[in-house]
Image: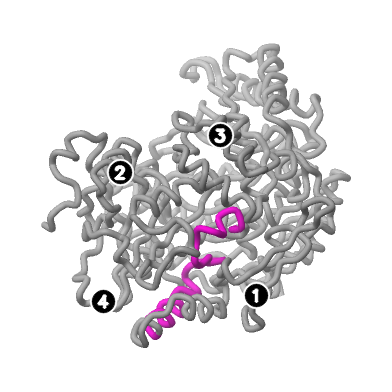
Amino acid sequence: MKKLALSDDILMQIDKPARYIGNEFNSVKKNPADVDIRFAMCFPDVYEVGMSHLGIAILYDMLNKREDTYCERVYSPWPDLHNLMKERNIPLFALESQDAIRDFDFIGMTLQYEMCYTNILQILDLAQVSLLTAERKNDDPIVIVGGPCATNPEPIADFVDLVYVGEGETSYPKLLELYKEHKKAGFDRAAFLRAASKIPGIYVPSLYEVTYKESDSTIESFKPIYDDVPAVIERQVVKDMDSSSYPTKMLIPFVRAIQDRVVLEIQRGCIRGCRFCQAGMIYRPNREKSVDILKEQAKELLASTGHEEISLSSLSSSDYHALGELMDFLIDDCLSEGVNVSLPSLRIDAFSLDVMSKVQDVRKSSITFAPEAGSQRMRNVINKGLTVEDIIGGATLAFKGGWNKVKLYFMLGLPSETDEDMQAIPRLANDIAAAYYDTVPKEQRQGRCQITISTSFFVPKPFTPFQWAPMYEAGEYLRRAKVVNDEMKAQLNQKSLKYNWHHSDVTVLEGVFARGDRRLCPAILDAYKNGCFFDAWGDFFDFDKWLAAFEKNNISIDFYAYRQRDLDEILPWDFINCHVTKDFLKREWNNAMNAKVTPNCKMNCNGCGAGIIGSGVCHNAR
């Protein structure tokens, strides 16, 4: 085995040293001398979180299938190791080879949530790579980011060389071929970045100039600085899910990961049009894998990992066209092996008794539903498309199927939300608990049912119909949580109800970043230098440090978070084409304000714009 980058002395001092030693089962080992390109694929959070991420697993497998490329993994060192690496000047290293990633060709990072932005700087800092793209030299790695937050990469524009807008399977081959050409010709960083900007889906922030209006500080113009650099970046989408790359040998971590199971991706995109949901908009159109492909992949994944649970990955699993056939196969194949099947992302309306009966003999955990709002008016505003009959009916089926623990997810602070809408949340949970006691005979109950209500605070995201909406200040979010909590205590079945809510300061900061522009970069840099990283972790989040960084750099939270945007304002992400048109989003904003429900994509095409891609549900409907 190759010598580890960390000495025994250091490994003995830190928590969970297995996070850093690599050599996991199914990890890929290559001789670096045999490849043209070395790629460090980073998840900017701790190992246990990153090892559970499907996107990284797909790209790791896809890039390593190339003979000319060696893709290795990197995760954010936990603060205990961070401090030791800084003290002893140890450069950040890749798990497979244990080599310093500053010597790699690419450092790639996925942006899954805004609160990881300072962890990007942590990775670059520990790697001993310049934090600012303007200061990087020819022999520095190319820093590229992707993922859902890449649909508005402007808050980190100063730190990244390239942004990949779209699904990684499509344009990475072109980018790597271009890199090889430039490397053979004697690499010139500026020339490569300019050439890369012409690849579909690749955005080079340093090649664009932004001006702002003196009157209100909104964007006046956003344009490339060269005529041959595209003014609009088109998000890249996999058209044929069956032929796209998918790993059949998942890595087995030494440390228990958040999701310790086989993950089977059954489709991308969503036919629903929930107006708060960025994923539901940017991943359009809905594209399914064939059931035969899924059966093959499930067999190979279970055989190659030894996991005891298989989970179906999707934004809305119950909308998959052949869910019944797939479940029959998994149950028949998995039950004999003692393997559990989990069904996350289920809609409570489509959760049929037939599917419930298929899994009822398999080991059960709690079941999760996301009504998102308590009142019918509010569910219409967000276009959830659920009635109270759907919800109570679905919960009743779950109780008949043997579950007695239900988790319910809601949001607070949605546009036009009233106190009555908030109070409807615990009332709905109470009705669900009552359905349990009405459904399950007393002699068959195993104690009380447990209904756990969780509320997150709404954050408006780019490319959603709510992208123009204002947020509330942190104190108002807490008041809204108190309204829910007080109402819960008044319910008849309150002993069966439990309530959790999210931190409000983190929500405000997430809101600033989600719709931010490149003027935020200096504040993010200052916050990191003052000790902010792992901001998504409550133990490390320090809002006062962020407030100090904002004040130093004249950043107004009011401007970025609390302001109602004009529908015609130039938004920081308007240069990206996610295929869902702005006219559609405006129509949906107006429908929300009128509490008008829009049919799902299988019921009716609503002209969102994603049909131009020519695949998935849009193609099948013709």
* Image point (34%, 39%), residue name: 78
Q: Residue furthest bottom?
A: 185
Amino acid, disc 2:
Lys
Q: Name the mark on residue 225.
A: 1
Image x and y of residue 61, in percent: 35, 66
Q: Which residue is mark 2?
A: 86
- The residue that mark 4 highlights is 35
Earlier sequence position, callout 4 versus callout 3:
4
Q: Secondary structure at mark 1?
A: loop
The disc labelled 4 sits on which kind of residue? Answer: Val
127 left or right of 385 in image: left
Q: Amino acid at mark 1?
A: Ile
Q: Is residue 30 above or below residue 77?
A: below
Q: Earlier in the sequence, mark 2 or mark 4?
A: 4
Comes first in the chain, label 3 or label 1: 1
Q: What is the spatial separation of the Cα atoms under label 2 and label 1, in whole angstroms?
A: 38 Å
Most foreground residue, 77 or 96: 77
Q: Nearer the viewer, mark 3 or mark 1?
A: 1
Residue farthest along the right direction in this orientation: 594
Any mark on residue 398, and which? 3
Q: Nearer the viewer, residue 251 or 481?
A: 481
Instruction: Report whether 574 appears left or right of 312.
Output: right
Element marked by disc 4:
loop
Which secondary structure, mark 3?
helix
Q: Magenta segment range?
A: 153-181
Residue 321 seen in the current view: no
How many residues crowd mark 3 within 10 Å: few (<14), some (14–19), many (20+)?
A: many
| Relative side of 143 to 396, left or right | left
